[in-house]
Image: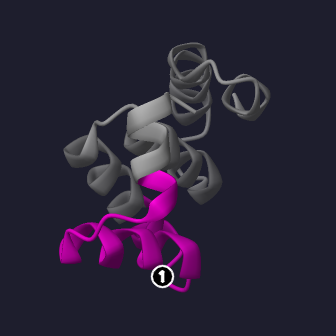
Amino acid sequence: AQVYEYLGKPTAALNRIRQAVLAAPLSFHPWFVQGRIERDLGMESAAAKSWTRCLELCPGHVEAASELQKMEMGGWTVRRLWRRVFGR
């Protein structure tokens, strides 16, 4: 999934990471990656659910907590704006 994400193929990445989440639903990392890909696809609600699940499984996950906090603040980052405009 992360290879597809790196190659700029978020739809393929999402399909792969969903398979990983189904295969290992109690592992926090696939939930975190799924949230990142969902965010990149503009699926903010789904991303928030994935990061929340990641935090349930690993309460100290700093990156998931940070992503949720950014989302709750509704703040646009340069990276998010760039991806929205240019699709990467």
Q: How is the image coloured?
A: one colour
Residue found 58% across the figure and 29% down from its top? 17
Q: Is residue 72 left or right of residue 62?
A: left
Residue found 53% across the figure and 16% down from its top? 15
Regarding residue 44, the answer to whether it shows in the image is yes
Above or below — where is 36 with respect to 67?
above
The foreground one among 41 and 77 is 77
In which quadrant of the rendered image does the C terminus lie?
top right
Horizontal and vertical percent for residue 13? 61, 23
Q: Is residue 61 left or right of residue 50?
A: right
The number of callouts visible is: 1
Q: Secondary structure at mark 1?
A: loop
Judged by its main secondary structure, the magenta piece is helix
The foreground one among 77 and 64 is 77
**Quick one: which residue is furthest to the right in this view?**
3
Question: Which residue does the numbered mark 1 point to in the structure image?
Answer: 59
Horizontal and vertical percent for residue 51? 40, 60
Regarding residue 61, the answer to whether it shows in the image is no
* Residue 23 belongs to magenta span: no
Q: Is residue 7 left or right of residue 20?
A: right
Q: Is residue 59 left or right of residue 6?
A: left
Dot 1 crowding, Cα within 10 Å, few <14, some 14–19, many 20+: few
In which quadrant of the rendered image does the N terminus lie?
top right
Above or below — where is 41 with respect to 60?
above
Question: What is the three-letter code of the residue carrying label 1?
Answer: Pro
Query: To which quarter of the image does residue 40 belong?
Result: top left
* Residue 63 belongs to magenta span: yes
Horizontal and vertical percent for residue 83? 48, 40
Magenta residues span 54-80
Horizontal and vertical percent for residue 24? 61, 39
Residue found 48% across the figure and 69% down from its top? 64
